[in-house]
Amino acid sequence: MVTPELARHLTEISHDLHRQVGVMIDRQGSIIQVIVGDARGLFIPPLPRERGVRGRLKGLRLIHTHLDLSPLSQDDLMDLAFLRLDAVAALTVGPQGLPGRIQAAHLLPQPQDGRSWTILEAPHVTGLALDFDELISSLEAEFARSGSDGAGKTRERAILIGVTGPSRAAAEDSMAELAELARSAGLEVAATLIQRRPRFDPRFLMGKGKLTELVIQALQSGADLMVFDAELSPSQVRSITDFTEIKVIDRTQLILDLFAQRARSREGKLQVEMAQVKYLLPRLRGRDDALSRLTGGIGGRGPGETRLEIDKRRLQERLHRLQQDLGRVRAERQERRQPRRRLRLPVLSIIGYTNAGKSTLFNALTHAQVLAEDRLFATLDPTSRRLRFPREREVIITDTVGFIKNLPKNLLEAFKATLEELEEADLLIHVIDLSNPRVQEQMAAVDDILASLGLQDKTVLKVFNKMDLASANLAALQCRMHHGVAVSAVDPRTLPPLIVRLEEIVEELPVSRTSPPEAPPAVAALPD
Ligand SMILES: Nc1nc2c(ncn2[C@@H]2O[C@H](COP(=O)(O)OP(=O)(O)OP(=O)(O)O)[C@@H](O)[C@H]2O)c(=O)[nH]1
Ligand SMILES: [Mg+2]
């Protein structure tokens, strides 16, 4: 870890200056920094980034002196954790400036007795029987193992963090949804942590002690990302990233990323990118800020193939271009919708919380092949089909993007144009996942979003889906309370009551629908 000669140099200088003296040593044994502190401590200046080696640890160790017999301090251990140093060692300066006792700490891949580091000690430098190279390579190997599933690390691993006020139950529900979002975005959840705080720390959102724990936990679980279940202000992201050196994103960014991954249509892609650019703009400082250093991957992905270019001026230009492009694409969409308008068929739009089963129901009703998947926001682009009911009435039925509570404002704005199509709907079919433990909040969230789109006065039919996964009592109760219909979209035999209800509703609509269609529509699914 340190040669007796170097140790002696350090303690002698330290003795003469009556200050702590330290050196930062890389794995080749070269000294890359010399640090002179005061009698009680020293301050490590920013480490040159390019010195970092591949691996979980920084590839640097700090050897420094302590003028008295004090053990490694809390600050020493914080440096170890935050800078991910290979090791931190303290040499006691003896009476004649000779090296005395040595204490060294390194991080542990797994916590032992609740501690994430271990301390080695010897009465003299030469007494520390230790092959440093061997120690480091086995530590790296273990860190790598705890951070991957054997086949090499492909997915980003995240720690999810909730910082909450009084209600723990609400925080847990919210975290469960955040975990779903993370999973849908292709993240692996390494750990989940909820911290309750009566008041939020405006800078870090949580206490420094807790943040320290977090960094160590991230290191041990091989996480390269922290996802906060809150909307972080630009300066919070900066101070947390600067403090922890770990990429930080918030729930909004996670949802934006998910949308970026899922957008298929040109309009969808443009809308997502616009929301991303609007989100990023106020969050930029100079070029080399924490954010731009730590982007890429989740949160830094654009809907196209390119990584989001993090540069303020270019973002502004991009925003301008996006607005123009969107305008054009929307005009085209309006044109495409003209013929459909002429048909004057009733429009039934399927809406609801994400993952409620909207696309599955759409497919079941129309025999379409819209992608339905057990992930949030599988559908971003609306799809429409003509559908003929058994009683020969014809309608247009539309599948739409799912809703979520606290939908990021930028996204709601970006998708407003697509969602405005809902204004033309004669009926909103609100699909609800009965099996979800948060079903009540989900229903309320959908109502809120409808209201914010000015659609609160539309006729809504509540369809309680996934009845196969819920108790019959619950289904019956909800249907009675909301005058709804229960179905299981994966089982066509459960659909007739819904089709009957839809027909009834459509019958009540004013009949101005004429023009026979050219191509035959799909016929509503009825059991054989
Ligand atoms: N057991 C069961 N699973 C269902 C039912 N309906 C849908 N699912 C499943 O729920 C998951 C989500 O279904 P989707 O149809 O993609 O849901 P969605 O509402 O379109 O979701 P987004 O487009 O992501 O907002 C899929 O894995 C479906 O197979 C049902 O009635 N019973
Ligand atoms: Mg869908």
Image (spheres, rainbow, N blue to C red):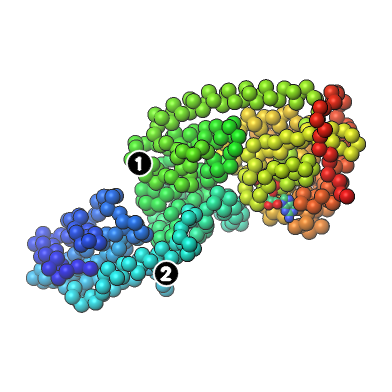
Q: Is residue 31 left or right of residue 355?
A: left
Comparing 113 with 206, the one in front is 113
Pointer 2 residue: 111
Locate residue 230, reporting x and y percent: 52, 47
Q: Is residue 53 left or right of residue 125?
A: right
Question: Can residue 39 be seen?
Answer: no
Comparing 64 with 341, the one in front is 341
Q: Which mark is residue 165?
A: none
Question: Can residue 435 be seen?
Answer: yes
In what quadrant of the picture does the N terminus appear?
Answer: bottom left
Locate residue 336, reporting x and y percent: 68, 25
Circle 1: residue type: Asp
Helix, strand or loop at label 2? It is strand
Q: On screen, 295 above or below 82?
A: above
Comparing 520 with 10, the one in front is 520
Circle 2: residue type: Pro
Please report the residue visible at 72 percent of the width from the left and 22 percent of the height from the top. Answer: 338
Please report the residue visible at 11 percent of the width from the left and 64 percent of the height from the top. Answer: 9
Locate residue 501, reporting x and y percent: 86, 41
Pointer 1 residue: 289
Helix, strand or loop at label 1? It is loop
Please report the residue visible at 89 percent of the width from the left and 34 percent of the height from the top. Answer: 392
Q: Earlier in the sequence, mark 1 or mark 2?
A: 2
> From mark 1 to mark 2, how far is it between C-alphas?
32 Å
